[in-house]
Amino acid sequence: MKKVTFLVLFISVLTNSIIAQKLEQAITLFEKEQYKQASELLESISKSSKDYAKAQYYLGRITFNQEDYSESIDYLKEAVEYEESAENYTWLGNAYGRYTQNIGKLRQGVVAPKIKRNYEKALAIDPNKIDALDGLMEFYSQAPSMVGGSMDKAEEMAKRIVVLDKIRGYTALITVYQRQEKSDLAIEAFEQLAALDSRYNFNLGVFYQNNQKFEKAFNLYDKMYQDDPTNTLALYQIGKTSAMWGEKSSEGIQALEKYLTIEVRENQPSYAGANMRLAMIYENQGNLQKAAVLYKKAIDEDPSIELAIAGLKRVSK
């Protein structure tokens, strides 16, 4: 009898070990985006296994990444049934969120509350689950009030994220304030973000430009360039800001002319763009002849540059 019990125990341990190895291999394949091979391994894990919920979770993640959100919901619902974890509920909320983007308005009204409900269940298990807080922020800030949307609640979620992770929290606050068209509050949040991590300075400058805070944008890019003379993106933005602002013309011209002597790196503004911005500065100064020459040069370099085409029409009247 003891031998039989030991044999059963041995087989059980061996089986669990094989399944655990399968799961580990499947997760590695998932991380490498080898979804077909990963799915085959995950589908072979039976309901009787302790790893079944985890297998369903990863199948849900795979189908989510493949944009099959209905299938993803089915897998993640199965995962939740076998393991009520904050992670499983969060991803089920994510799947419902994406699913609602591709269905009719009436159906959205039925499905939308499920997004909120699953994020709330995740937070009931783990109040500090940032992904669930972020998901709720997105829900509250985009859903109509009749299905639970609320900008006040969206802001509350973002502020809770700030306490846990300032970078993600201020990013969430920027989103909330932008969706309310509260540009001054969005700028304050963006400034807080950039103060935490200087890598956000460039995007802060673009945000200043988009909100017509040109002096702030100019001073920021000028400081970035003074701190690092190899920062050719900042050099270009000095000129661009001057062109958009209509001020600091001499500094803008100097920056763009210098930019035009530097080899353009991949994913950086082209010479056509720099010549167009130069033309804008001369147009702002009233030097239409010089502006026309530069607009033409920009168009010769890039015939699709619409701002230069429009600029040439203006100065050629």
Image: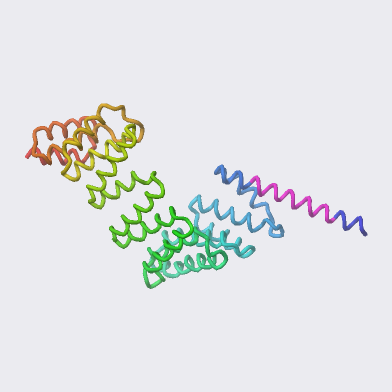
Q: Residue 116 vs residue 256: left or right?
A: right
Q: How many marks?
A: 0
Image quadrant where residue 60 sits: bottom right
Image quadrant where residue 243 sits: top left
Residue 148 is situated, as x and y percent measured from the top left of the image, at 41, 71
Quarter occupied by the N terminus: bottom right
User: Which secondary structure dominates the residues rendered in magenta?
Assistant: helix
Q: Write the start and end of the magenta stretch as one range.
A: 8-25
Quarter occupied by the C terminus: top left
The reply to whether the magenta stretch includes residue 141 is no
Query: Which residue appears at 22% of the width and 38% of the height?
Result: 239
Residue 269 is situated, as x and y percent measured from the top left of the image, at 29, 36
| Extreme residue in the bottom direction | 146
Q: What colour-coding does the image apply? A: rainbow
96 vs 194: above or below = below
Q: Residue 8 vs residue 39: left or right?
A: right
Query: Which residue appears at 50% of the width and 64% of the height?
Result: 119
Residue 232 is situated, as x and y percent measured from the top left of the image, at 31, 34
264 vs 218: above or below = above
Asked whether 201 or 120 is in front, the reply is 201
| Extreme residue in the left direction | 317
Asked whether 7 or 289 is in front, the reply is 289
Query: Which residue appears at 52% of the width and 60% of the height?
Result: 129
The reply to whether the magenta stretch includes residue 16 is yes
Asked whether 41 or 61 is in front, the reply is 61
Residue 205 is situated, as x and y percent measured from the top left of the image, at 30, 46
Q: Residue 179 vs residue 116: left or right?
A: left
